[in-house]
Amino acid sequence: MSDPVLAVERLNISFHTRRGVLRAVRDLSFHVERGETLAIVGESGCGKSITALSLLGLVPEPGRVEGDAVRLEGRNLLALPEAKLRRLRGARIAMIFQEPMTALNPVLTVGEQIMEAILEHEKVSRAAARDRALALLERVRIPDAKRRFSDYPHRLSGGMRQRVVIAMALALSPAVLVADEPTTALDVTIQAQILELIDELKRENGTAVVLITHDLGVVAEHSDRVLVMYAGRKVEARATADLFARPLHPYTRGLIAARPQPGGGRARLAEIPGTVPSLFAMPAGCAFAPRCAVAEPACGVAVPPLMPAEDGAVACIRAGEIHVPEPAREALRA
Amino acid sequence: MARYLRRTIAQIAFVIIGIAIINFFLLRLAPGDAAQVMAGEAGSATPEYMAALRKQFGLDQPLYVQFFSYLKNVLTLNLGYSFRQGMPVSDLILQRLPATLLLMGTSIAFAVSIGGMLGLLAARQAGKLADTLISALALLFYATPVFWIGVMLVVVFSVLLDWLPVGGMASVEAGLTGLAYAADVGRHLILPATTLGLFYLAIYTRLMRASMLEVYGQDFVRTARAKGVRPRRIAVRHVLRNALLPIVTTLGVQLGSILGGAILVETVFAWPGLGRLAFEALFQRDLNLLLGILFCSSVVVVLVNLAVDLAYTALDPRIELS
């Protein structure tokens, strides 16, 4: 196995607020290979978006990022000064965002904004940058790209704007593309197009993709491996097919069971009882225990360690004992 | 665009005439007239003398006759005659207008450029020492009365240090010409322009800082960072351009109040501008002159508003005139 393009080792992100220290991400480790898509899933507030931002060194104040390393092509980003980090952002690691409607500067044309990404990192003439930007717009299949080039963002639909953001992110063929819920704000039909576009560009360039999402349907179709987060921690990490076939963590099982099924009619969806605990008031032991159907007294004592399991890892002391419920198997077949 | 301009110009004409009508009746509400003031000054206020003055000024006519002759004059852009100053009103205004434009132009240009820069700096250093200093200074200038700053500047720079003239617009005795005259006016301009400018400077500093900080929080700034754009470029290209709209709005309001802002400073520094002319006209009940000045400033306000609308479209492509 070659060295992973991106390797995160024991990442910790905390916010020092007046109410106390909020630990948004704890001891998170993962890696992504060239040409691979790693999906990070979890509920709102589980720390997945802040993890995405930390990969580019964009965690806002008063957030603090600590940890052993975030290694991008061998370089530890946590140890780099801001000026050097800036030169990697957009060039070796790029990001696309959840809200295409607000992700573009309203007073610059989309062409200028793509050109800016190129001109900021490479010593090329404006004319050359213009040609490349135009080619990028065509490549993300924006119809009538020549005319769109000098349009302002407000004249484009949400899907078109997301294509522009993708073109911008791919302008310098980065090694890693971080996509933070890239389709959440879009229509279902547009969602599929955008995700297919990302897949296609990934195959062409060998880019590694970190796909942040809460949509298990997206995970199943567009990722190779999955990392499930709960309350700031990794609870399960598996190959996508394995995860859907045999989810090990009770939380993962709950997520999979809660998916609407085609042909499921109007029946009430399964749900996970309770809510995510406040990051200010974490229970001792497993953070999921208060909502867990199979919790036992030991779960409330210590945070369960990540244990190797079926070519992946799971953090649940009962993971080995519990049998996989039938609905999950059906979910996979469906 | 052409349609917008046609419609707007029609509106402008309507608004200006409306203002002129309101001005006319508003000023008649004040007690006393020019005849009274002049007779009072002459010290021989016989009823016959006052009646003669009123007849001469046309003040003996019924109000509606005065009104229609005023309206006719306005429509033909004839601003009338100042009996008090013995000159046509338009000549008086043209004589004083350049001084006011010079003073206001200089102080606002000073305030917008320096204030904008300080605000930009404060926003980029938000929460740090530079920001604290700039914000405290801006608050100080904002809270200090303009006339007090003016008097203090005179005390320090004219009286104690004797670097700059106390007041006026040019040295009377010198009879300078050309460049020397311009330099002389420049020296006279420094104190009044600074006095007026410091107050506006505080406003623009605070406004620019707040506006920049708001834009810094927006998603597209994060996108620019994720692209690896340099912080300085982000500040100027992405944040500043989006933060300019509120500045232009305020600039429009302040250019519109050219007259009001200048009265105080023109009085303190004996600056021969429109503000002082209006002030004198008011006390002497020189209604023709006062109406003329008000008419001119209403034209300025309306035109500045039009310019602001046009500036919006240049700054923000989402705004279209129709």
Image: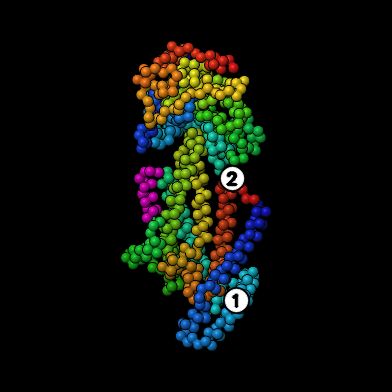
Q: Residue at x 47, y 40 (%)?
A: B217
Residue B154, horizontal then vertical, whole percent: 36, 65
Q: In this rendering, would B4 be left or right of B50?
A: right
Q: Is residue B14 above or below residue A50?
A: below
Q: Is residue A67 above or below residue B30?
A: above
Dot 2 falls on a residue whose secondary structure is loop
Check the image and name the residue furthest to the left.
Answer: B160
Q: Which residues are magenta?
A: B126-140
Front position in the image: B110 or A284: A284
Residue B316, horizontal then vertical, whole percent: 56, 46
Q: Residues within 10 Å of mark 1 (few under 14, many from 20)?
A: few
Q: Which residue is mark 2?
A: B318
Amino acid tagged 2 = Arg
Q: Residues within 10 Å of mark 2 (few under 14, many from 20)?
A: some
Front position in the image: B19 or A324: A324
Residue A18, horizontal then vertical, whole percent: 36, 37
Q: Quadrant location of residue B129?
A: top left
Q: Residue at x 40, y 36 (%)?
A: A61
Q: Which residue is mark 1?
A: B63
Q: Residue at x 64, y 34 (%)?
A: A145
- The secondary structure making up most of the magenta span is helix
Q: Residue at x 61, y 66 (%)?
A: B17
Tell me if residue B162 can be seen.
no
Dot 1 falls on a residue whose secondary structure is helix
Check the image and name the residue furthest to the front.
Answer: A267
Residue A74, horizontal then vertical, whole percent: 43, 23
Q: CA distance from mark 2 to mark 1?
A: 50 Å
Residue B258 image label? none
